[in-house]
Amino acid sequence: MDVLSIKKGEKMLKKEWQAILKHKFFIIVIIALALVPAIYNYIFLGSMWDPYGKLNDLPVAVVNLDKTSELNGKKFKLGDDVIAEMKKSKDLDYHFVSEDKASKGIKKGDYYMVITFPENFSENATTLMNKKPKTVQLDYQTTRGHNYISSKMSESAMNQLKSEVSKNITETYTKEIFAKLGDMKSGMKETSDGSNKLADGTSSALNGSKELSSNLNTLSSSSLTFTDGANNLNSGLNKYVSGVNQAANGGQQLSSGADQFVSGTQQLAAGTQTLADKSKELSAGLTELTQKTALSAEQQAQISQLQNGLTDLNNAIQNGANDTGSADSVKNDLASVKKSLEDTQTILSDIVPNQIKAMAQTKAYNSLKTDQQNELNAAILNSAQSTLSPIQTSMTSVADSLTDVGNQLMGIQNQTKELVQNSNVALPGANAIISQLSTGLSDVNSALANQVTPGFAQYADGVNQANAGAQQLASKSKDLQSGTMQLVSGLSQLQANGSTLTSGSNQLAGGAQQISSGSQQLANGGSSLTSGLGTLNTGANNLSTALTKADDTLSATNNSNENAKKVAAPLKLKHTDHDNVPENGAGMTPYMINVALFIGALATNVVIGIGFSGEKWKSGREFMLAKIGTNGLVALLQGIIVWGAVALLGLRPNHLWEMLLSVLLISFAYMAINTFFLTALGKIGEFLMIVVLVLQLATSAGTYPLQLAPKIYQVISPWLPMTYGLKMLRETIGLNGAILPEAILFVVIIALFTFMLSFFKKFSRFA
């Protein structure tokens, strides 16, 4: 390198720093670039700094189906004991739930493992010392599809739990074995005590047998003195003979009473037969009475018709009472008419005088002489009197008639009210009485049919049974009479042979007293022998019991190789995982695809920039379409190629085409986001996307479960797209392929950020 080149380099370096110092923004850019590795390490490593130290935040469901069993007569439920220890433990975040809730939770990703204590967990644990010990099995299910590393953590935790449960079972059986050894020790002590008692009892039995032998000799030598004791027997036999004589006399009286008893039973049989016959007649009469008291359909219809008629009559009377108001109105009208007639009479009386007064005011009337005027007045009065008098008389007669009619109406009205009052009492009462009569007849008939007749039938059955018993008694009384005669005959024979019995008893007199003395000594010796034999028996029983107990204890404890293996390793784990994630690569694929597509989108926008042509865009719409044509094509190719690449590695997803759709949606979404921010913010956008990438690496739970990360990462996670991209790919690769909510979200992201590209015409650099 020559001096000229060095000088040119120094000159360019000087210009660069002059530009940097002149523009403060460049200083910020240098500082930001320097911070990128630190930001990456701090954020990414901070999310997984100590995941194994936070396993107590890993949610695990625990289902206890275990049932109570018995071990050596004691209630035993190992599942409850283990769960009690798990509740005290902080190894994992245990959730003690039902089987259904656990199944739903692990499918949704709420739990990373489900531990199940089966129904026979305790029952199998009690068989470890049996001839055929059963395996104690603990089931657990992981979900590699939601997080592969969490499944490995869960398996490690289960191995630790297995050791603890095995220790618990082994400890329980060790205690039981030592308890049985204690029982054997106690049984051996009882065996020793029993053998001592057996020896003592044998010695006592030997001494007793010697004493018994001596007393038997005494009994043999005293047999000649037995006669003296027969005197007491002779005295007793005399009393016995006397009693037999009294019994013979009583037998005669019994025979006489038996004859009277036979006669009485025959009379009783005749009386009960008569009672049974009369009961049949009475039963027939009750049946007829029941039929007579029952109302026929026609009678019931007549009663109903009578009740309806009474009701109609009462209604008619009540309607008549309502018409009394009309009578009052007529009465008032009659009074008005009468007054009008009286007024008319007054008017008629005043007509002639008024006409005369009016005529007196005329000139023609005044031109007449006084005599002529009087004569004219008299003629008018006479003529009017002859005309009006019959009319007034008729009107007076009519008025009087109207008064009579009004009085008659008042009487009718009063009678109607009285009739209404009486009908209100009489007719409903009659109707009620008829109803009561009908009900009473029905009740009587019901009582006869349901109570009296069945009751009398029972009574008649009882009478028939009594009659049968009386007839049988009369029949058997003859046997009684015959037996009484035989008893009297036997007593007579016994009385006749009493003297022979008394004579024979004299032969027993002699050595009874000596026999009594010898037998007493024999009894004493026998008691000693019995006591010794009892002690011997007790000792033998104790010895037998203790030996049997020791034998049972040893027999109950099987010591085969199989038992030893089961006690040493009593628990077996049964692992299930229904997710299609057989290896670590399949578990990491969703994470790596998301990271690769985001980096690919960022690199595409850094390389292509505003565009290949360098043309200035005239409108935002043109810019948006251009980016769709270039960046959109790159996103499509990136998605298809990365999908094919993982297939070449051996990935076999559960839902192949749903996975391809998910990869394409993720690729388009990341491309739209990066294109928008890098276009809008330039270098700042690039830096911002790097920070977003690092945040997503730390918060999307691509490696360790999110629950093991610090709280701040759990808060940020739902706001970043990679969280949902991971979920989509996990669903399609190893789970059930339910991606609809996430797919809709990514379609919205693609549409939103692509549409916002059309607004870039407002920036001067795109004008």
Image (cartoon, rainbow, N blue to C red):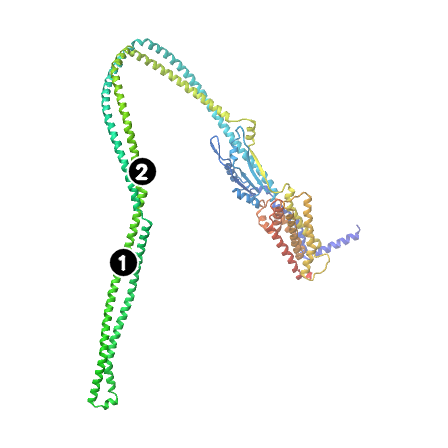
Q: Which circle marks residue 423 in the picture?
A: 1
Q: Position of residue 489 (x, y in %)?
A: 26, 19
Comparing marks 1 and 2, which lies closer to the viewer? 2
Residue 194 vs residue 390: left or right? right
Identify residue for label 2.
458
Between 573 and 390, the one lying in front of the other is 390
Q: CA distance from mark 1 to mark 2?
A: 50 Å
Residue at 26% from the left image edge and 59% from the top image edge: 421
Q: Position of residue 404 (x, y in %)?
A: 23, 69
Dot 1 falls on a residue whose secondary structure is helix
Q: Position of residue 666 (x, y in %)?
A: 64, 51
- Considering only order in the chain, which callout, 2 or 1, is on the residue closer to the N terminus? 1
Q: Position of residue 466 (x, y in %)?
A: 29, 33
Amino acid type shown at disc 2:
Gln
Q: Residue furthest left?
A: 371
Dot 2 falls on a residue whose secondary structure is helix
